Amino acid sequence: MSIATQIKHFATTLPQGVQLIAVSKTRTAEEITIAYNAGQRLFGENRVQELVAKHEHLPKDINWHFIGHLQTNKVKDIAPFIQLIHSVDSMRLLKEINKEGLLQQREINCLLEFHIAKEESKFGLNVEEACSILASPDFIEMKNVKVCGVMGMATFTVDVDQQRLEFNKLKTIFMQLKSQFFVSDAGFKEISMGMSDDYKVAIEEGSSLIRVGTAIFGDRT
Ligand SMILES: *Cc1c(COP(=O)(O)O)cnc(C)c1O
């Protein structure tokens, strides 16, 4: 299926409350423009340099999400425009985002990334680390970051039960943090989970943001 057909297919079939992030890493401006012209406005990138260049050259009403591992010294490059950073995995990074948010006089939306997969290589916090961040006076004083929810990546596997287990784990973490730290905060509402191969299971398990690349743009070379 073509890029435009895929975008329209997602737009008409996604359940209410689930948003599609078109993961455009490695894709050309032409490919992104096809998706844009089909109505897509939410795009995800995982490299700062590539994102900054695309932000400069593509329409200004695109909502850019950062989904890759973020180094503290790169935060300043995306702080002026980023809509949501999915990959906060340390207090140090959160402090840096807050600092750059203050300089830009904006509040930067973030998700806490959790390690839910079996692979060791994937980044992310565990629940204890997240609770200690959220309970800390340093965090409570931060005025220029807004924690909007959680993000995770499931194990790369064809075992649907395993995927489901891991997505369910992330949903449970979300609900625990919600009740412990964000009960009266309607802005804590996002669960970013699900990619091309597992987004259907992720949606069944409560995803609000799916991050899909290959299923829209085809295989990455
Ligand atoms: C590349 C990437 C995706 C999209 O992967 P596809 O399999 O192409 O859908 C989703 N999330 C993250 C964090 C990624 O790096």
Image (spheres, helix red, strand yellow):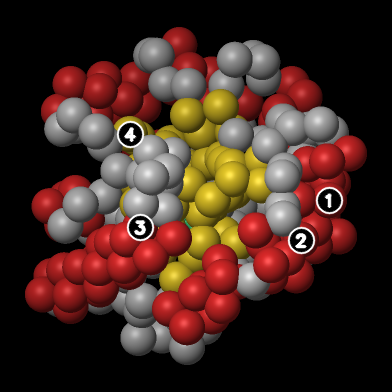
Left or right for 13, reference 220: left
Q: Secondary structure at mark 2?
A: helix
> Viewer-nearest of labels 1 and 3?
3
Q: Which mark is residue 7?
A: none
Mark 1 CB near ligand 1 (8 Å cut): no
Q: CA distance from mark 1 to mark 3?
A: 25 Å
Q: Secondary structure at mark 4?
A: strand
Q: Say which label, 4 or 2, has the lower sequence index.
A: 4
Closest to the observer: 220 or 207?
207
Q: Secondary structure at mark 3?
A: helix
Residue type (three-letter) at the residue carrying disc 2 = Lys
Q: Are marks 2 and 1 in contact (CB under 8 Å)?
A: yes
Residue type (three-letter) at the residue carrying disc 4 = Gln
Mark 1, other Cα within 10 Å: few <14 / some 14–19 / many ≥20:
some
Q: CA distance from mark 4 to mark 1?
A: 29 Å
Closest to the observer: 182 or 37?
182
Q: Which mark is residue 178?
A: 3
In the image, residue 216 above or below residue 31: below
Q: Are marks 2 and 3 in contact (CB under 8 Å)?
A: no
Left or right for 66, reference 16: right
Q: Secondary structure at mark 1?
A: helix
Residue under pointer 4: 19
Residue 186 in the image: x percent, y percent?
Answer: 38, 38
Residue type (three-letter) at the residue carrying disc 3 = Lys
Residue under pointer 2: 95
Query: Is residue 151 shown to the viewer in this render?
Result: no
Q: Say which label, 2 or 3, has the lower sequence index.
A: 2
Residue under pointer 1: 99
